[in-house]
Image: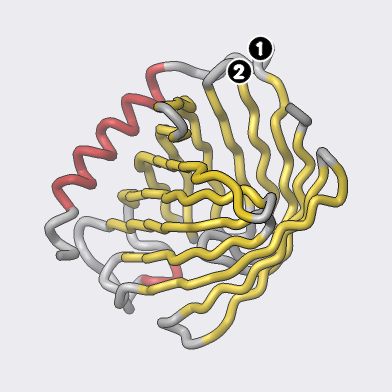
Amino acid sequence: MRFAVKPVAFLAVILAAATVGAQTPDPEKWTFDSLTVSAGEDALSSGITGSVWLKKDQQRFNFLVQQKQGWFIYGRQFTVGKLEGLVAGSVGHFDGAPWIGPYVTLDLPLGKVAGQKVSVGTMQWPVIQAWVPDGWKGKHESTPYIGYFASVQASVGPLGLSLGRLDFLDDPINWLPGVSYTANVRRDFSVTSSVTRNTNAKRWMLYVGATWKISS
């Protein structure tokens, strides 16, 4: 199953490269959407992290930096009925190795329960790295150098439940169940805390982040 996804991932990376190179964001026309500063660990972050989202019409641009990795994401939001999504290309580096890949998120509101918004969603993020990251050299290597993170999540108001699946090089597949809680301090400022189980390392990962978002 792990090898069957590789031709698809190669095609996806080619499409992502075309997406990233097709249009360069014009900073004079883009507006600030949100800023998140966080600490701790979850499925995609470790250590002190800063993430900025910009928007222009349906276009979205994200820049993230942290201790061992950083990335750019550029793409478009879309809506089909109640379904909301983002299709984008991404480029970045992880532990000294550059990578490229497509990035897709989907979110479907299901209504309300006891006044709380209920929704389900998913993220799909395959990447190909140029070479083996520094921390994996001589231990877990495979060719081509592929990583694939996928997750599904459900939220009821401020409470979120998630299950991630990380398939990286020839490491054992890592299942990452987690739970999060988001407290809205005010309309444009929120604080999120989460706990995620790293099943490969058999330990819990704790995360806390604060987000400032321009009100719609």
Relative image position of residue 183 (x, y in whole percent) = 78, 57
Above or below for 43 versus 117: below
Residue depicted at x 37% and y 25%: 19
Quarter holding the C terminus? top right
Nearer to the camera, 142 or 187: 187
Above or below for 84 versus 199: above
Q: Secondary structure at mark 1?
A: loop
Residue depicted at x 32% and y 65%: 167
Q: Secondary structure at mark 2?
A: strand
Q: Quadrant of residue 3?
A: bottom left
Q: Is residue 191 left or right of residue 135?
A: right
* Residue receiving disc 1: 29
* Residue receiving disc 2: 56
Q: Is residue 29 left or right of residue 98?
A: right
User: What's the amino acid at mark 2?
Assistant: Lys
Q: Quadrant of residue 152?
A: bottom left
Quarter holding the N terminus? bottom left
Label 2 or label 1, whichever comes before in sequence order: 1
The span from disc 2 to disc 1 (Cα, nearest Å) is 7 Å
Label pair 2/1, CB-CB below 8 angstroms: yes
Residue depicted at x 44% and y 40%: 91
Q: Is residue 41 left or right of residue 7?
A: right
Relative image position of residue 27 (x, y in whole percent) = 65, 17
Relative image position of residue 100 (x, y in whole percent) = 37, 42
> Badge 1 local density, few (<14 within 10 Å), some, or many (20+)?
few
Q: Nearer the viewer, mark 2 or mark 1?
A: 2
> Badge 2 local density, few (<14 within 10 Å), some, or many (20+)?
some
User: What's the amino acid at mark 1?
Assistant: Lys
Q: Quadrant of residue 204?
A: bottom right
Nearer to the camera, 213 or 154: 154
